[in-house]
């Protein structure tokens, strides 16, 4: 089960993980984001698979796998086995359901877990991917060390994430911005440091800022469309959505992306073949 969050008892870090999982396992998030919850969508996931040289027979761990789109696509395209782990139980259930309707259900599996304490044994994966989620983790260094722990010697990490240049504007610093991958986005060098400090060796950094601008534009359009449908009572969004807040947030995010304060990068690193 997704760990229950009680604001009176739990720490801020639990609140961040809980709220993030709650947002991305909701029904309406797909309406706004589509199937893949990261800039570049499945095309960028497939690109990551090419960069990591995924092959049939390899074991891949997708950390923060959301509703399972990337794991399923990687299994379909590369014939590799993929285990997805996400903090949200409902996301895991939805991912299993989605996988069951594909021809690759024998290659993919999903389980609930925390990136900072991955529920898998040491040295059991050839590759670890983490798309648009590392930036939300409260303890990024521990998560990076977990990536290294579960990789076989010679295994590779593929991170794709939001990057920032300079400081995050004040109106993009709250919890909503945090779980929307913005508030704690790191400079590219920040991600590199986490991976190096975990004992990994850097391979490649690619900037894909254009896919972020596209995603912001798409979300804005879908948000307006959803608002109209709700007003016309064509759809109901359980729990309701504060459209004014969401639109104001998207305007700030769009302005920051236009000013090149944020970008998107694919970063790969390797675990040494020597056991150190
Ligand atoms: C922006 S979504 C990305 C989902 C997926 N990687 C994709 O690209 O479609 C962020 C995901 O991170 C998950 N998440 C957040 N904190 C986590 C943690 N500590 N451990 C595991 N998953 C976490 C959330 O539940 C959510 O599904």
Image (cartoon, rainbow, N blue to C red):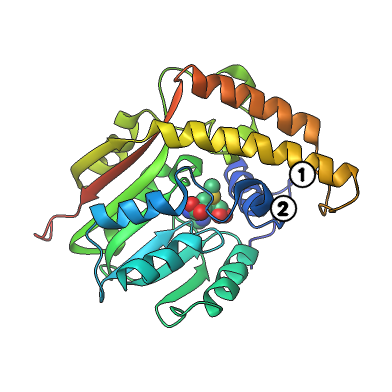
Judging by the rendered image, the residue that carries numbered circle 1 is 226
Work out whether residue 108 or residue 178 is closer to the camera in this orientation and state it. Answer: 108
> How far across and how far down the image is residue 108, in percent?
43, 75
Work out whether residue 226 or residue 246 is closer to the camera in this orientation and state it. Answer: 226
Report the quarter where the C terminus lies.
Answer: bottom left
Which numbered disc flags the more N-terminal residue, 1 or 2?
A: 2
Of circles 1 and 2, the one toward us is: 1
Work out whether residue 213 or residue 6 is closer to the camera in this orientation and state it. Answer: 213
> How far across and how far down the image is residue 55, in percent?
24, 69
Q: Secondary structure at mark 2?
A: helix
- Residue 1 found in image quarter: bottom right
> How far across and how far down the image is residue 131, in percent?
43, 49
User: From what the image shows, is residue 148 above or below residue 174?
Assistant: below
Q: Name the residue located 56 percent from the left edge and 68 percent from the top edge.
A: 95
Q: Name the residue located 71 percent from the left edge and 58 percent from the top edge.
A: 27
User: From what the image shows, is residue 89 above or below residue 201?
Assistant: below
User: From what the image shows, is residue 22 above or below residue 100?
Assistant: above
Identify the disc placed on residue 28. Answer: 2
Label 1 vs label 2: CA separation? 9 Å
């Amino acid at each position: 089960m997704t760990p229950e969050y009680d604001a009176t008892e739990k720490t801020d870090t639990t609140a961040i993980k809980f709220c993030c999982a709650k947002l991305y396992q909701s029904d309406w998030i797909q309406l706004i984001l589509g199937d893949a919850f990261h800039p570049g969508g499945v095309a960028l996931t497939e690109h990551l698979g090419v960069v990591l040289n995924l092959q049939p027979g390899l074991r891949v761990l997708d950390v923060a796998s959301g509703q399972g789109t990337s794991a399923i696509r990687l299994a379909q395209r590369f014939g590799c086995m993929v285990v997805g782990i996400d903090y949200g139980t409902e996301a895991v259930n939805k991912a299993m359901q989605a996988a069951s309707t594909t021809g690759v259900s024998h290659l993919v599996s999903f389980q609930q877990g925390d990136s900072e304490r991955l529920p898998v044994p040491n040295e059991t994966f050839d590759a670890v991917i983490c798309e648009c989620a590392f930036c939300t983790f409260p303890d990024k260094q521990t998560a990076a060390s977990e990536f290294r722990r579960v990789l076989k010697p010679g295994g590779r990490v593929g991170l794709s994430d939001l990057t920032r240049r300079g400081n995050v504007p004040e109106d993009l610093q709250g919890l909503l911005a945090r779980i929307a991958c913005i508030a704690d986005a790191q400079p590219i060098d920040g991600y590199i440091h986490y991976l190096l400090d975990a004992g990994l060796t850097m391979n490649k950094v690619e900037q894909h800022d254009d896919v972020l601008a596209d995603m912001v534009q798409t979300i804005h359009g879908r948000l307006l469309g959803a608002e109209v449908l709700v007003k016309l009572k064509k759809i109901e969004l359980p729990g309701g959505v504060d459209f004014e807040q969401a639109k104001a947030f998207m305007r700030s995010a769009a302005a920051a992306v236009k000013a090149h304060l944020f970008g998107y990068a694919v970063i790969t690193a390797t675990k040494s073949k020597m056991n150190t």
